[in-house]
Image (tube, grey):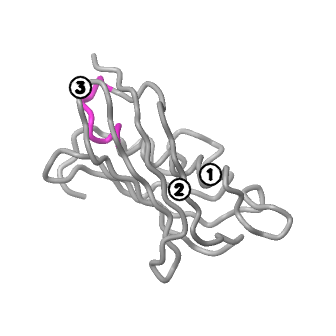
Amino acid sequence: MGSVKKDMDRWLGDGGMALLGQLGATFTSYGVDGEDLGWVEGDFVPAALACNPHGVVQAGVHAVLLDAAMNFATNAALGASDRTQATIELTTELLRPATRDAAYLLRGDVVRLTRQIAYAEASVFDGDEQLVSRATGTFLLHRA
């Protein structure tokens, strides 16, 4: 898991958001890289709630998962009493359809961390490691 700045173990699983679990997502591991930038990985097996009547995951569900992954990665990089306060900007792209009951990998990474702002990206990959969706986000930080 690498060097961990903050103990985020209690947030593994649904990340503290019951909706993520109901959609079929779970966070499984996290840490910080050599530049003290956080990351998180998880699994996503879309539940019926995440899909339209044809079994395809809705775009808004991708946005929720990707936003949560970036938020988790950012919090993993912060000190014990610091946290994200709000998502300022979120941009998503859907490149391939995700379908009900298939298995996907969820990954979030912080790419730049300043005193007040974090910049992050997140992706969903299919079982063949093809990019399904991705997002970038900007987050306001609360520093103690």
Residue 5 spot, x, y in % from top left: 22, 40
Picture disc at residue 96: none
Picture disc at residue 21: 1
Q: Residues within 10 Å of mark 2 (few under 14, many from 20)?
A: many
Residue 30 spot, x, y in % from top left: 33, 53
Distance between the Cα atoms at labels 1 and 3? Answer: 31 Å
The amino acid marked with disc number 1 is Gly
Query: At 25% from the left edge and 58% from the top edge, which residue is drawn?
Result: 1
Label 2 near label 1: C-beta < 8 Å?
A: yes
Q: Nearer the viewer, residue 111 or 79?
A: 111
Secondary structure category for the residue under label 3 = loop
Q: Nearer the viewer, residue 41 or 96?
A: 96
Q: Residues within 10 Å of mark 1 (few under 14, many from 20)?
A: some
Secondary structure category for the residue under label 1 = helix
Name above or below for residue 85 compared with residue 65: above
Sequence-wise first label, 2 or 3: 2
The amino acid marked with disc number 2 is Thr
Sequence-wise first label, 1 or 2: 1
Q: Where does label 3 land, which residue?
A: 115
Q: Is residue 18 magenta?
A: no
Q: Residues within 10 Å of mark 3 (few under 14, many from 20)?
A: few
Which range is magenta?
74-82
Query: At 48% from the left edge and 53% from the top edge, which residue is drawn?
Result: 135
Residue furthest left in the image: 34
Name above or below for residue 65 compared with residue 119: below
Q: Where does label 2 land, which residue?
A: 26
Distance between the Cα atoms at labels 1 and 2? Answer: 6 Å
- Say left or right for 6 vs 23: left
Name above or below for residue 75 compared with residue 38: above
Sequence-wise first label, 1 or 3: 1
Query: At 40% from the left edge and 59% from the top edge, which residue is drawn?
Result: 41
